[in-house]
Amino acid sequence: MKDFTVGNGHNELKAAATKRNSAHMLPVADWLNDLAENTQLTDLIEVQFKNTRKGYFHNAAHLPLEKGVKVVVEANPGYDVGEVVLTGKLVELQIKKNNIDTSRYEVRQVIRIATDEDLERAAQAHAREQETMIKARQLAKSLGLEMKIGDVEYQGDGTKAIFFYIADGRVDFRQLIKVYAETFRIRVEMKQIGARQEAGRIGGTGPCGRELCCSTWMINFSSVGTGAARLQNISPNPQKLAGMCAKLKCCLNYEVPVYEDASKLLPSRHTELETKDGTWYFFSSDPLAGMVTYSSDPQHPGNLTTLSAARAHEIIAMNRRGEKPDSLDGNRTASAEIGYQTGHGDVTRFDKRKKRPNNHDRRDRRDRQ
């Protein structure tokens, strides 16, 4: 019977979690994999390391590599261990899509298929990451640096580590690198990441009940604006729109193109409808249903009436001809049914950047004290 110590059990659980997280990352569908000449077109392969970090390498030795194979690749310095996620022609397309300049980007070589010894040594290196991260945060705090160490990733041979940090402004960490190198006896690389990348590396469960998109399948992060919420008529509640990273949820962007296409079929919100009953002003819309709601008051919801976009365009055409219909002929909605949530803050705070105090402000505060 295998003897599990406390330390070994923790390391094995962490290795299993890392393997599970890597397996859930949705890679590019290798739809050219079944073509015999696919790997003959290029010797480039895409290798994934911890979480979302990937690299491109030459299979100069023409090893029999396919998706899921663990390989040892060249690093600077030493070597690293990763998993093959893509081979063949699609790798070149990925490089082009990610705007990687191959004249500047040094494409290194695949050394060999990883052996049990390589995997064991890499597992031992990765087992040090949690302890190193905690100690690294303490050292950064002791130096008074305004930064946070979000994650640490050891190279497969254990001779180098990447410290992923988060900072609002520019940080001079030259002294910190010296301290890290002396403390951990490794080569140090600092890499800045954003709040979304940090959430993706840490992982978690979203309000939908599923694992975070950023930690399961998202590789590239695009900006999310409050306009996406307004376009989809989502309640402007910052507490509900914010994700685990305290930024607007990435899923707000998922259906934006559909809403944009549907909104093109709706009349302009600046166009007023003239009827014999009076003037009607745009209040809200449901792009997917093709319905528009108008109010008799330009400032407040009054006599709200919902009608189809086709009927609204028909009235607009009549108004251009100098004609006015008797009424909108829509469904009347009680104004009391329209509610607003207050007391949750302004959703536009996501669009604003915090103003960092300059040196003069700091000196003024010290003088006042």
Image (spheres, rainbow, N blue to C red):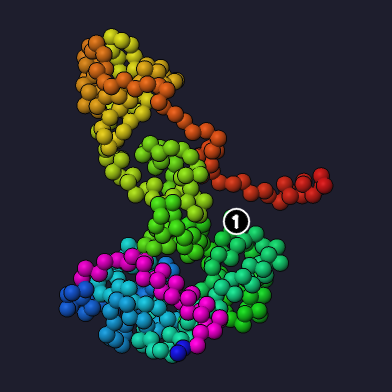
Report which residue position mark 1 lands on.
169
Residue 93 coordinates in the image, percent (x, y): 28, 66
Quarter location, residue 45: bottom left
Quarter location, residue 265: top left
Q: Is residue 269 above or below residue 55?
A: above
Residue 328 coordinates in the image, percent (x, y): 26, 17
Identity, as a three-letter code, of the amino acid under mark 1:
Gly
Q: Is residue 9 magenta?
A: yes
**Magenta stretch: helix, strand or loop mostly:** helix
Q: Residue at x 25, y 72 (%)?
A: 89
Residue 341 coordinates in the image, percent (x, y): 49, 33
Q: Residue at x 52, y 82 (%)?
A: 8
Q: Is residue 102 visible?
A: no
Q: Is residue 59 above or below residue 286?
A: below
Crowd around label 1: few <14 · some 14–19 · many ≥20 (10 Å):
few
Specify the segment rendered in magenta: 3-32
Q: Secondary structure at mark 1?
A: loop
Q: Quadrant of the N terminus?
A: bottom left
Quarter location, residue 316: top left
Q: Is residue 124 above or below residue 19?
A: below
Q: Image check: 9 left or right of 232?
A: right
Q: Residue at x 32, y 77 (%)?
A: 68
Q: Image check: 124 left or right of 304?
A: right
Q: Is residue 146 magenta?
A: no
Q: Residue at x 26, y 66 (%)?
A: 29
